Amino acid sequence: MKKAIVIGAGLGGLSCAIRLAHAGFAVTVLEQQSSAGGKLQRIQSGQYVFDRGPSTITMPAAFEQLFRSVGRQMDDYIKMYPLLQGTSNYFADGNKVIFNSDAAEMEEQIAAYSSEDARQYRAFMSESASLYQLAERHFMNRLLVSWQDKLHPSLLAALWRVKPFQTLDQLLRKYFRHPHTLAMFGRFATYVGSNPAKAPAIFAMLPHLEIVRGTYGISGGTYSLVQGLVQMAKEFGVDIRTSVRVNQIVTRQGRVVGVETEDATYEADTVIANGDALTTYRDLLAEEHRPEMKDQKLKQYEPSLSGYVIMAGMNRQYTQLQHHNVFFPQQYGSEFDDIFIKGIAPIDPAIYVCHSGYSEAGMAPIGGSNLFILVNAPYTSARWSWEEQHKPYGRYIVSKLSEYGLDQLETQADVLMTYHPEQLERDTSAFYGSIYGISSNTIKQTFMRPSNRAKLKGLWFVGGTTHPGGGTPLVVTSGQLVAESIIKQSRFDI
């Protein structure tokens, strides 16, 4: 029986482990945290339940495919439900737009501040749909591990059609003029950890994905997804060990033969790193064993943005809040200069608030609110100390929210916790505390991400740093695609 080690019990690692175990591999998953889930963790304080990590769930078919591929039904493990309304976008001048699949309603909301932009809405969404269809057909459901894969004529033709040399902001300005609309759709670049003024236009596909195809909740909170995958993995015999940190990937004669932890050596024919690919190269492999990723090349990658989180449990509700909410500043966009150029916490950021208790009872006491508050933040560097600044910065963000009517957060909260990029880096080995590994602020980092297959035989990567990229459904897909390749290759190994 072939043995596989998966480093990290994030969604991509669990996805890969399940498929390999179903195919007959003996799979062991080693997770350095005390519980599975990677960046997605459940935090509970009294009657308040928070999901620390991804909260916007799209593309349910990506999750359903995983269950179907091993002969199971997703509904037996997790319950997804469509949200009746999408993200509520609030602007400093009092205007708001609530995402809705009804184009006429969207036009009416946009027309409240710009009739010109409202007239362009359907044309933009048509282009958004076209970009999504191209990405789905040619990029998201295939690995690109060889030059033959990357230079395939159909792929190159599709690459040209997704406007690689045009930024998201440039594409948006073909349709819209008003700062509200540009901010509302430009913010989608942050879903891949990037700056809308630099990220390629391909990410204009995300409005179609979220607004037309819809967003979903998961009964019991997003962490229930992790619990469902863990349950299924164990049913297939996957050995999941938590609080185990891998110190080194062991190699012999040009291939992996296992991993070392503080307490043991685990032998394996295949190692799949679900921890950040660049951190894995840097920390778990000597430079001579990673010819494609020398130290100098590692330094050339720009990490994605990170996030600063406040979790607030309030024994009251705010009438303006729905499940997903974004509060935009007077002038949107300066946060990206703060993050990527100055390396400091943004002075005037957009603020995201998830209130999952809006959609589901039991996440907070009756009449209460479980607020997951997220602000984009710089990846870790010497230019900003979160250990020193996280408390005063948290008070600053709370004061900003009070301007939108979310008052008394600091003075009357039953629960008030923070989580910052340095903690994320320490807990998950995220590359400089980044959420998505590397940014998509260049064509190269968008379309030529680190390969899912290392030159060192037997070493593979899944997760947001590699293809097809960041986002909950895509990392699950990456686990599937890598598992399929490993299974196929194993049939030819002696």
Image (spheres, helix red, strand yellow):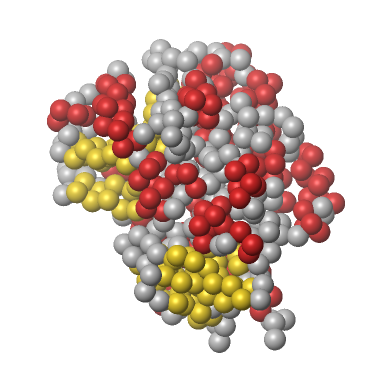
| Residue 28, image x, y percentages | 45, 75
Given residues 70 and 457, the one toward you in this image is: 457
Q: Quadrant of residue 315?
A: top left
Q: Is 257 rendered above or below residue 1?
A: above
| Residue 76, image x, y percentages | 40, 68
Q: Quadrant of the C terminus?
A: bottom right
The number of discs equals 0
Residue 198 visible in the snapshot? yes
Q: Is 465 rendered above or below residue 371?
A: below
Find the residue positioned furthest to the right: 153
Given residues 58 and 456, the one toward you in this image is: 456
Q: Quadrant of the N terminus?
A: bottom right
Q: Is 18 rendered above or below residue 156?
A: below
Say whether residue 482 is left or right of residue 12.
Answer: right
| Residue 14, image x, y percentages | 47, 65
Q: Quadrant of residue 196?
A: top right
Say whether residue 308 is left or right of residue 99.
Answer: left
Say whether residue 116 is left or right of residue 403.
Answer: right
Q: Residue at x 49, y 72 (%)?
A: 259
Q: Residue at x 27, y 21 (%)?
A: 399
Residue 229 visible in the snapshot? no
| Residue 170, image x, y percentages | 67, 24
Q: Is 131 rendered above or below residue 251?
A: above
Q: Residue at x 57, y 57 (%)?
A: 281
Q: Residue at x 70, y 82 (%)?
A: 493
Given residues 104 and 366, the one toward you in this image is: 366
